[in-house]
Image (cartoon, grey):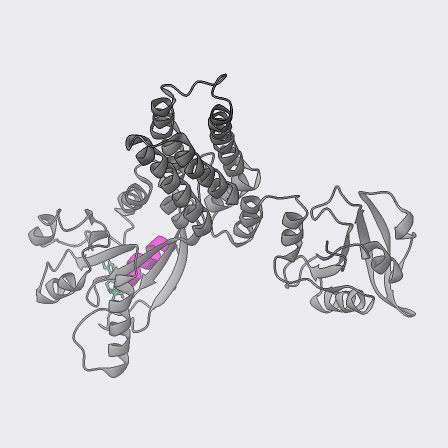
Amino acid sequence: MNTDTIAAISTGMTEAGIGIIRLSGDQALVIANSIFDGKDLTLVDSHTVHYGHIRSGSEIIDEVLVSVFLAPKTYTREDVVEISCHGGITVLRDVLNLVFASGARPAEPGEFTKRAFLNGRLDLSEAESVMDLIHSKSSLSRKVSLSQLSGHLSNEIKILREKILHETAFIEAALDDPEHYDLDGYDSKLKDMIEKEWSSDIERLLHHYSEGEYLKNGIRTVIVGKPNVGKSSVLNRLSGKEKAIVTQVPGTTRDILEEQITLEGIPLIIIDTAGIRDTEDIVEKIGVERSEKELHSADLILFVMDKSSGMDQEDKRILSLLPTDVPCICLLNKEDLDSVYVSEAESMNERFDAVISLSAKEGTGFQFLKEEILKLFFHGSLSDPDEIYVTNQRQKYELDQAMNSLSLVVKTIELGMSEDLYAADLMDAYRYLGLI
Ligand code: GDP
């Protein structure tokens, strides 16, 4: 039971029209009331808003609206008070300090949601999705978090758990009372159910795990190529902004530029590297070494060549440095110029996941590039926000464990062993799913 009252600024720490301070706990009303000039907040109805002033002694700090929410119909299931102040940071800080001086303590990051979880208002996957929602990097990942928050994943898991529990109860009953329950032929029925229904339900959730990860954290995309082929220009085209310094002197993109862009709702973390090449310049060399490191941790590599000058030894050297286990798209840039036929690249369809001609200058070819990227990471179909995504490692772990337990059940059945042996594994699967 949490008896202390917590408080925090619930809106961003920037200058804004209004800012909200939220209190939650047994003493929320008493504390707010002790600094509020207006109606007696301890006597008002739930879900009501009250006009007044926050004062420190005789000094008025701000003119505010106070919203009162009485337990249990609140986010945390405790008494909650929200003080809407004028948005200046100093005003918010002053009011918050008064709230602390009157008996509340600072909320830890995520503590309101933690209380909602502990008080049974949210289940764990819903609480996690609140955190994901706050940190979501794109509109699509926001929709996915919202869908989890409204319990889509929880419901799916609940249905599966009910089925497993039903079968376990049947086995236990049959073992206790063999006269009334017949286990003849039950083994193969259960094996069928696991293999054809339950496993595929879990597999479907797991299948979307990597997609969920990309949606949540973005696809780490490294742009490589020798200097002057147009890497920074490609990045600028993709992001629609002038970020990298684009010049005609080879070797100007010395440091790693990281940029987040959103491609049809999917976050892409783009990393523009120093042109990888043999260099004596020490500053540039550091950039080059970092580029090589980035390559190995990437989800996607965009290898840029200049279509107007063809493929030379330097392109080939960079190509030889690319890790073979990371998806790679070859971009033949500057298609607006007279092109030298880059036959080597075009005939390397096996090495690349796609070879695309484009012009960063004119903006042509970028639609193909976007489609290819989505195809590579989302199996051709752009994510449906109503689809259920498992976006978090903990959930994936429990799903894997449940899957293992179910395969043990199948193995035990295949070995012709008795029901009480696999009933235990069945219960394990039930428990693992429950942890989600
Ligand atoms: P980086 O060194 O690989 O990052 O290359 P930059 O993006 O700095 O581009 C090098 C030069 O090529 C600049 O002068 C760009 O304006 C030019 N450039 C880049 N893309 C294109 C393109 O598609 N067509 C043409 N004609 N020039 C381009």
Give whichever of 105, 380 is nearer the camera: 105
Check if residue 238 falls in the magenta segment: yes
Residue at image x 42%, y 48%? 397
The percent position of residue 79, horizontal first and vertical second, equals 78, 50
Magenta range is 230-239
The percent position of residue 141, horizontal first and vertical second, equals 47, 46
60 up-or-down from 211: above or below: below
Image position of 64 (left or right of 18): right
170 up-or-down from 55: above or below: above
Residue at image x 47%, y 21%? 178
Image position of 18 (left or right of 302): right
Check if residue 33 falls in the magenta segment: no
Image position of 76 (left or right of 424): right
Q: Is residue 1 visible?
A: yes
95 up-or-down from 43: above or below: below
Give whichever of 105, 274 is nearer the camera: 105
Q: Quadrant of ligand 1?
A: bottom left
361 up-or-down from 119: above or below: below
Residue at image x 29%, y 50%? 363
The percent position of residue 174, horizontal first and vertical second, equals 48, 23
Residue at image x 19%, y 61%? 322
Q: Is residue 242 visible?
A: no
Give whichever of 21, 117 is nearer the camera: 117
The percent position of residue 364, horizontal first and vertical second, equals 26, 47
Image position of 99 (left or right of 370): right
The number of callouts visible is 0
The majority secondary structure of the magenta stretch comes to helix
